[in-house]
Image (cartoon, rainbow, N blue to C red):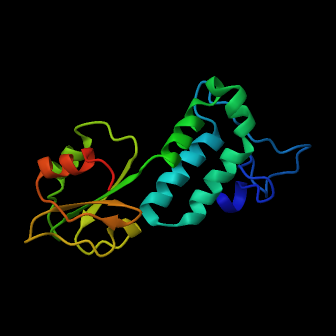
Amino acid sequence: MIERFADAENGGFFTTSHDHEELIARRKDADDHPIPSGNSAAAYGLLRLAALTGEHDYEEHAVGIFRLFSRVAAQHPQAIAHLLRAIDFHLARVQEVALVSPAGQDGLGELAAGVRSSLHPHAVLAGGPEGTERPALMSGRATVDGRAAAYVCENFTCRRPVTEPGELEALLAAPAG
């Protein structure tokens, strides 16, 4: 997407790729009615991807979209509700949650249900068996005494892992710090 659709000069993403047949003009959509625009969806997805991978280039592309459509956001916020959601995500304290199960077991059900038991609009979630290295959020995460574990992190700095859904829910509800 970045390689084929990004506007490196002005930010944002075109609706057609660079190798598309030549048009009079390449447009960039911003209107989120009735579904999110490509730029809004890209901004939100890139921010979530940055939170999972630690790749700040993704975040920079999202910020480029915000810059490009900042005037529209200020003058017509009702037209770009999904883009405003992405801006909110960018400005918020994002929690990264890594769920790790013992290799060969699917022990994430209770912990995943703990994350999904309430709304966490500023959280990203990755899960897999011990030894999973991708996305980067999973790298180096281990089970605790052979039990599935949850790591709640911010900017890839994690609190101690927990093994109980109630402990996980408490970490997700805890204030920053």
Residue 128 horizontal/vertical position (percent): 26, 63
Residue drawn at point x = 57 percent, y = 30 percent: 81
Where residue 7 sits, quadrant-wise, is bottom right
Q: Is residue 54 above or below residue 11?
A: below
Q: Is residue 124 above or below residue 128?
A: above
The residue positioned farthest toward the front in the image shown = 177
Residue drawn at point x = 52 percent, y = 67 percent: 55
- In the picture, measured across the screen, residue 33 lies left or right of residue 89, that is right
Counting every numbered tag in the picture gives 0
- In the picture, measured across the screen, residue 145 lies left or right of residue 69, that is left
Q: Is residue 26 above or below residue 54?
A: above
Residue 129 horizontal/vertical position (percent): 23, 67
Quadrant of image for the C terminus:
bottom left
Q: Nearer the viewer, residue 67 or 117?
A: 67
The residue positioned farthest toward the left in the image shown = 145
Quadrant of image for the N terminus:
bottom right
Residue 67 horizontal/vertical position (percent): 71, 47
- In the picture, measured across the screen, residue 29 lies left or right of residue 99, that is right
Residue drawn at point x = 78 percent, y = 57 percent: 18
Q: Nearer the viewer, residue 129 or 8?
A: 8
Residue drawn at point x = 11 percent, y = 54 percent: 164
Residue 70 horizontal/vertical position (percent): 71, 39
Q: Is residue 131 above or below residue 66?
A: below
Where residue 3 sits, quadrant-wise, is bottom right
- In the picture, measured across the screen, residue 81 lies left or right of residue 20, that is left
